[in-house]
Amino acid sequence: MAQTAATAPLDPLEPRDLVAPHHDDKSLNETLLDHVWRKPGKGWFMLFGLTLSALGLLVIGVTYTLARGIGVWGNNQPVGWAFDIINFVWWVGIGHAGTLISAILLLFQQKWRTSINRFAEAMTLFAVMCAGLFPLLHTGRPWFAFWLFPYPSTLGAWPQFRSPLVWDVFAISTYLTVSALFWFVGLIPDLAALRDSSKTKLQRTIYGLFALGWRGSGRHWHNYKIAYLLLAGLSTPLVVSVHTIVSFDFAVSLLPGWHATIFPPYFVAGAVFSGFAMVITLIVPARKYLGLRDVITDRHLENMNKVILATGLIVSYGYMMEHFVAWYSQNQYEMWTFYVNRATGPYAGVYWLMIACNVITPNIFWFKKCRTSIPIMWVASIAVNIGMWCERFIIIVTSLSQDFLPSSWGIYTPTWVDWSIYIGTLGLFGTLFLLFLKFVPAVAISEVKELQLELKHARHNSHGAH
Amino acid sequence: MEATVLDSWVLAEFETPDVLVDATRQMREKGFQGMDTYSPYPLHGGSEALGLPPSKVPFIALCGGLTGLTTALAMQTWMNTYDYPINVGGRPLLSLPAWVPITFELSVLFAAFGIFFGLLGLSKLPQPYHPVFESEAFRTASTHGYWLSVPHATGQDASAVIDQLKALGATQVTVVTGEKE
């Protein structure tokens, strides 16, 4: 396998051996469904216990917030937006890799995506759920969150559609809905496979309900193929629009450090950057635990690291442009923000950590050795996640805490409630993810089988041609 | 689609997807109608072998998208320009550029709903019961089996169909009957 890839320079669009070739449909089925039927091991239960405890922190944090009001957070004047928006943007960003892997790579006919897309889409869904919690709680009275939607209210008031915060509501809810539909549509054939290989009547009934009676009919596939492609086509601009709209929350305001036209593309690149890093963080242990090394090969990981390198460079370029424009405008407030406050101010530590994680770390992926080393990429991916969190912290907190008037400056410190809600969402994400790994095939089986057949045809054809 | 009384089918399993596609084409050329293939993933050339017309899903998606677009524009214009005008620093009430983000999002949302429900509707799903499930062997269709169903009228002898399918390479053939679709 590796020898053929090394000897002949291949067209990048040509299908390559991304699945270990000793599998046929039946054995693929067994390998990929194995982790669903197998009883979860000790490791799973330990992790589940851990994430459930973290989820408990979320319950405590949210209950306390609801009982006492958001005064229990560290938010103050002037830092009215802090952990809630930092974490919101961070989680949404993580979600974006899922859609990118599924949608954009599907449109570009990047066959290597098949093994990781299910995984990444699940990540999207759970990340967006976590993200949604923060603005909801931030309203202070989340039980009135429906006021944000245009509904015929007795107050006679409509939402203000010129506000980016209302755009956010539409963007995030659309994103969550479309991601869920895309994920579910991709899942239907595999749910049918689960139904048909069920061991007990209960399993067959439950999976049968979710499979909607899918029977692999050619007439259904005929519509399915185009529907899936179209959903992918829709998701692609959706990703770009969602993070663009999130960046508008900042960019349309006049605050130094926020008021920048580079924000939309720079935010989108940052989202892809952190999202791919999160995929690596999760997939490295999962493929080991689930025994999916044949399907999620080292090639996949290497490719993802290349994406991390590319988007990391875009993010670095974004930082450079922010600094350049601040200098070029010669606006004293912008200059202060970028050259004094961020680099040497009270949050300088976070700033330099961000630079180390986001600008320096991805550059190790220029070296093939680092791209293909599992421990190195795992540590690097965690660094990137931390770095992107720091980026959001820097953007939000430094700009708000020291803006135009020194008389209105203030320092922000998160409280234990802030931390427990943040760690709690990590727990929520982990819990949902572990449940997903237990009950649903982590790899899109039908797509892998189709790819397998295509590879077989390609091998056959190339042998015929030579 | 329903060419004959659809309550009896001959189900045949084939070794590989290519043999199945080939057999489907030949059976259709012989004049069999309302056939269907079953496979764990889309067959290459499967739609052509069945002689299916282009899918209506893209059209439904377009209609959905346009509905979303019109809804969003009308909604924002009416709500913020006429019904509840909010003056923000003297900016124009009808500020179309500000309507763009929500208009885009709603177009995508409605198009996605169109695709999803269009897919379900065109495929007549959810349909938890279907007569083909009567055959236990057929359950491989979602994992590693390649099947072809040929409907034939009730009371008619299926043996001629069975023989033809066997000649085309079917490895096993069963007959299922069930409630009307």
Image (cartoon, coloured by chain):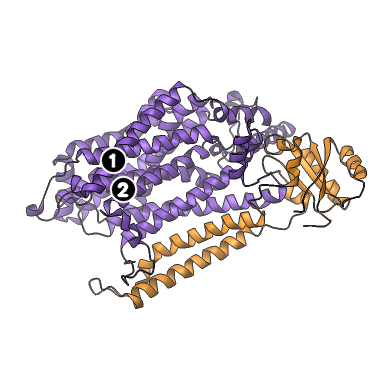
Chain colours: A purple, B orange
Pick whichever, A379 or B175, lies toward us. Answer: B175
Check the residue under mark 2 and report the chain it is in: A
x, y percent for residue A218? 72, 47
For the point 89% across and 38% down, which residue is it? B167
Check the residue under mark 1 and report the chain it is in: A
Q: Pointers 2 and 1 in contact (CB under 8 A)?
A: yes
Work out whether residue A433 can be spotted.
yes
x, y percent for residue A448? 61, 36
Kind of residue at badge 1: Ile
- Residue labelled with disc 1: A421
Badge number at residue A134: 2
The image quadrant where one finds the N terminus of chain A is top right
The part of the image, by quadrant, that contains residue A112 is top right
For the point 17% across and 38% down, which residue is it? A348
The image quadrant where one finds the C terminus of chain A is top right
A290 in relation to A125, above or below: above
Pick whichever, A144 or A179, lies toward us. Answer: A144
- State the count of labels: 2
A47 in relation to A87, above or below: above
x, y percent for residue B61? 57, 60
